[in-house]
Image (cartoon, rainbow, N blue to C red):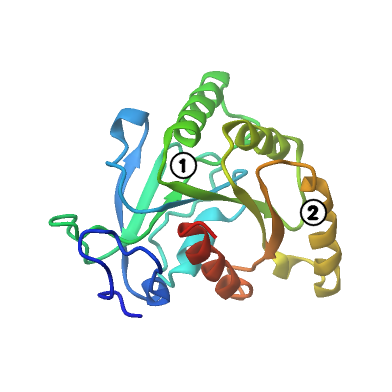
Amino acid sequence: MTGTDQSPGTNGLTEIDPSLFIRPWVFIRGVPAMKFLPPEGPPEIALAGRSNVGKSSLINALIGQKGLARTSNTPGRTQELNYFVPDGFSGEGGDLPPLALVDMPGYGYAQAPKEQVEKWTKLVFDYLRGRATLKRVYMLIDARHGIKKNDEEVFSLLDKAAVSYQLVLTKTDKIKAAGVPRLIAETLERIRKRPAAYPAVLATSSEKGSGLDELREAILLAAHGG
């Protein structure tokens, strides 16, 4: 199936062309509040995680495009919902992008002011609760540190909003390869009883490129309700 094999005006629908991940992507909008959200259209896949979990690096690696999602050594830099779509879709005459990636603000930065944390919580929960086109959230967990308390707080928020989420281990190249299967098993056990958690954990390394094909496949499947 090619990117043109779509029903007219339907957003591409029963299947998304995997070649989307090798074509150029563009940043279309930063959303600091709900009123700035783009109109609902294509399926949305969101990526969330603690500050410095490697979210921007993972997005760049997923689409093979260095510098699209801004990486920073300053924790808590991303304070908006940042939207990325494949290039070449005008949005006119039903020519909508078949998929949007949403980079959510990082959380868990200890030095963040209380009002900033409250603003983040409101923006994220309002988005999670009210976005019909959001198909899944990929929760990124640093393989070196595992699940932290504020990760579990976000899991609870997602459970409350009844939004499907799947855990993705990042930076697995920073731990011993033999420890990855055990970490996956331990992580699965931690989320086993959570109602909105998808019962599989992915392991990735942006630096080495490992696990990216599996994540791309999972995203394409989730975008159409898999």
Query: The residue tagged with tag 2: helix, strand or loop?
Result: helix
Q: Residue at x 58, y 56 (%)?
A: 54
Please state which of residues 7 and 185 is positioned toward the viewer in this rendering. 7
In the figure, is residue 132 to the left or right of 98? Answer: right
Quarter assignment of residue 33: top left
Picture coordinates of residue 13, whole percent (x, y): 35, 63
Q: Nearer the viewer, mark 1 or mark 2?
A: 2
Pick the residue in front: 3 or 112. Answer: 3
Q: Which residue is mark 1?
A: 78
Q: Residue 209 location in percent, x, y?
A: 58, 75
Q: Position of residue 206 (x, y in %)?
A: 58, 68
Badge 2: how crowded within 10 Å, few (<14), some, or many (20+)?
Answer: many
Residue at the bottom extreme of this rendering: 1
Tag 2: amino acid = Thr
Give me the residue at 53% from left, 39% from top.
76
Q: Amino acid at mark 1?
A: Thr
* x, y percent for residue 176: 82, 71
Cα–Cα gap, marks 1 and 2: 26 Å
Where is residue 66, by image quadrant? bottom left
The dot on residue 133 is none
Q: Residue at x 50, y 51 (%)?
A: 72
User: In the orientation shown, which residue stands out farthest toward the left?
Assistant: 93
